[in-house]
Amino acid sequence: MDVMDPDRSSVPVIATLPMGGGAVTGPGAGVLHVQWGLGNELRVSRVRGTEPSGTGATPTEGSDEISSGAAYVVQWGCVTGVHRELAEETLPHFEHLKDRVALAMHRGEGPDGVASCAVDAASRFARAVAKTLDAEVERLEAEASLATGGKRTADLEHVSLARAAWQLAAVYFVEPGDGTGAVTERLVEWYRRNGAALNFGGSGALPVRLRALIDGVAEAGDRPETATGFWDCLAGLVAMGWSDAAADLVALHSCWAEWRQGMAAAKPAAELLEAVVALIRTAPRMATADEERQPPAGDGSYPPGGAATSVPQFHAFREAWTRQVRDVLSDGALFDAVADDATSDGARGALEVLAGDETALARACQGGWLELMIASARHRYPRAMASEHLALMERCVARCGAGESPELDELLGAIISGDASRTTDVCARYFSPWFIAHLAEMLAAAAGGPAAGALASSAEVNGDDARTIGFRSASEKAAESRVMAYCASLATRANTRHLALRYLPHCADRGAGVAAQILRRERPPPGSLTDPVAGGVDEADPDVAFAKTLGALELCADAGLVEVGLGVARAAAADARARGDSTSAAAWLHRAGDVAGVAALALEQLPTVHLASADPSASAATLVRLAMGHPGAEAGLNAGGDAAVAADGEWRRAGATVAPGPAGFL
């Protein structure tokens, strides 16, 4: 890593540590100076000949006391590996989220319109990031299967947990139930996709029991239903709402093959299981926004295999369906005709789960409170809305006890509570800055976005609306703080610094200022670069310096940092002007479109009245040269020179502060 003696910048020393001690002299003597670098970085430099007990003054710019090569860098929270890949892939989704909300504000749609647009943008953003996490998990699983024989790596565990937390947060915060508040079906789907990765419930978890059952079925031969755990797993699948898997498991029963072979003794079992499968497959559910919704049946009954399009319709369908479940349960003759008691009891247990029997649910859910909560929400409390799930969770924890992982209990409980602030605080303890920044932005947009500021000044709102707008504004500020922390992580390493410059323009309070400091530290203007290995004495290659500064302007243009680009150009122009190269100074200002700055350069070179009267020809030649070398300057000069004078002050100040800005840019 390149050595940077901190005394070469305007960043103040934040700590001075003695080295050697006492009367020790030689290479080990001196002090250590600790200063901020970029992002999450501290730079430590050894300085010889400075008394540790002195005033703490640092060596001057030309001091020969600076130790060359004695510099150390401490970095933390860097974005590397799989997290860097996620950062690259999700950045466009983040920009689309912010752009959609900004467009709604620009159109002046009012608080309600902006809030609606923000929620829609949050929904799109949640789905896009979820797909990215899905793809990343699949890639890591494929790599793990090849490299470690299927053993899960640390990256795979972390990204899998991040996916589970992200998708669960989307269930409870982003238009819960597509605005209806009914999230049970989404919760069922979430656990189906993430249950194995969570490893919640230990050996009793349904995914673990299913893996054991697969081995048992293979050993059971032509009677799979005799495998250990067959009927327990069926009850668990029914309880968790995994209808297709439950039907597939029932299809393994030997009675089907026997019935097809004409064995009359198998008919009662087949008829009973056929009724069970029919009720499993026709269980009513709420339709989601991204699936085709079927029209209700003409006779008002629930549509087989269909979904309700409203909460009242869902309740009506469920009442009709539940009556059919109870009718089958009360048909004693149907059960008595089955010769195999295990089949009869197993079918009855599955039907009792469908009917919402509390004891049957507790018996079917052996994976802890999370499984019992999902099963209870689906079968016992189908009318429970998302806002009521926290109370249901607490009830299930009281019955089953806490999970094996207090950290996972805390994480799941925070999300289920629906408290955005608590959720981000808890997630910050376990996930990367990338996850926290994007989660905070999703939650802020889902809460309605930036429905304050410009909107409040252009729309008449009552007291309640004002309070809501204020809350959303606070959530936006909290989200920006998380993004700024993420940008600190990105800015720490050179290979992710360009990503930080894409995020910072969306941080209204501090983004532009931080971007300016990153660019000035990373891309100083030509002439100000020194060779750090040589102790800062020799000039660096001017071509390299030019390319770096030009790259900084391009980064500003790509990120939309107009003001920051002007600052970089004016710093480069001030440096060129100090070298007496007014042509290069004007060229830098032209690259940034700084007409006022060009006018300022021309203004200071205008011949005075005395020179014009003494040598009119030379003065005219000077004016021609200025017009050719400073195109566009006449706009600023003809306007009275006010803009040019203002720009002159700005780039003069830039020339005095070419070195990096204050310490610790966050």
Image (cartoon, grey):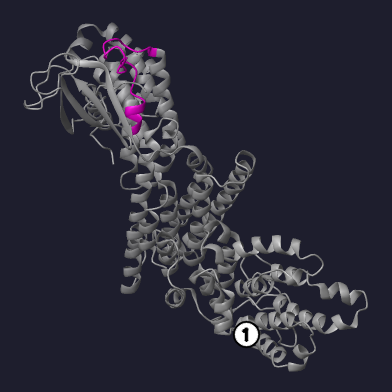
Give the quadrant of residue 64.
top left
- 609 is higher (above) or lower (below) than 81: above
Q: Quadrant of the N terminus?
A: top left
Question: Is residue 72 found left or right of 486 in the rendered image?
Answer: left
Check disc 1 and report the residue beneath it. Answer: 355
- Is residue 230 shown to the viewer in this render? yes
Q: Nearer the viewer, residue 45 or 148?
A: 148
The image quadrant of residue 262 is: bottom right
Q: Tell me what residue is drawn at x 48 percent, y 67 percent.
A: 172
Residue at 35 percent of width and 45 percent of height: 484
- In the image, is residue 535 part of the stretch drawn in magenta? yes
Q: Which residues are magenta?
A: 518-542
Residue at the location (65% across, 62% down)?
A: 212
Residue at (74, 64) in percent of width and height: 217
- Please provide percent x and percent y for residue 174: 49, 64
Where residue 198 appears, as percent x and y from the top left, is: 52, 58
The quadrant of the rendering that contains the C terminus is top left
Residue 656 appears left or right of 501: left
Q: In this rendering, is residue 14 above or below 352?
A: above
Is residue 408 rendered to the left or right of residue 339?
left
Residue 182: x and y, percent? 54, 74
Q: Residue furthest left?
A: 54
Q: Please provide percent x and percent y for residue 562.
A: 38, 36
Q: Main secondary structure of the magenta part?
A: loop
Location of residue 657 (image quadrant): top left
